[in-house]
Image (tube, grey):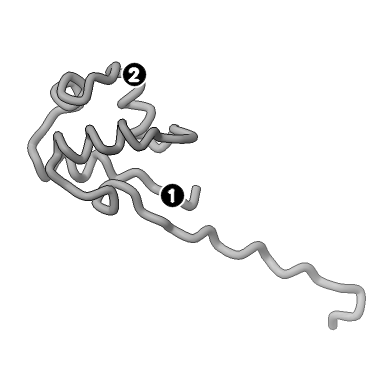
Amino acid sequence: MPIVVNLDVMMAKRKMSLSELAQKVDLTLANLSILKNNHAKAVRFTTLEAICRALDCQPGDILEYVPSPPPPAEETADSP
């Protein structure tokens, strides 16, 4: 997945548990866990704002773009 959520890294830097963060941002432990484990398909800006406020960080500290590797080149019939 090209967007990686580094929530666990920021939580470790701030010495904050998942349950403590869930309480501070008013999210269920299950939903925060989905985000932390890179299984979320989307995140609301309001949720991102609350997480950044609780962890005293910027969105770029949590979200990272990692390009996918290019697909392998297809061989053509004319290739040696």
Q: Residue at x 36, y 34 (%)?
A: 37
User: Is 41 rendered above or below residue 58?
Assistant: above
Residue underneath mark 2 = 30
Give the vertical position of 73 relative to 7 (above or below).
below
Name the kind of residue labelled 2 in the image: Ala
Q: Quadrant of the C terminus?
A: bottom right
Q: Is label 1 in contact with label 2 (beta carbons under 8 Å)?
A: no
**In the picture, residue 8 is in which quadrant?**
top left
Question: What residue is shown with label 1?
Answer: 3
Tell which residue pokes out farthest to the front in this image: 46
Q: Give the CA separation, mark 1 to mark 2.
A: 20 Å
- Which dot marks residue 68? none
In the displayed structure, does residue 75 sit left or right of residue 53? right
Q: Residue at x 26, y 40 (%)?
A: 7
Q: Nearer the viewer, residue 49 or 3?
A: 49
Residue at x 49%, y 60% (from the top left corner): 67
Judge from the rendering whether residue 43 lies leftward or rightward of residue 52; answer left or right. right
Q: Nearer the viewer, residue 58 or 12?
A: 58
Looking at the rendered structure, the kind of residue marked 1 is Ile
Q: Position of residue 43 (x, y in %)?
A: 40, 34
Task: Please give the count of numbered marks on the rendered protein.
Answer: 2
Front one among 22 and 15: 22
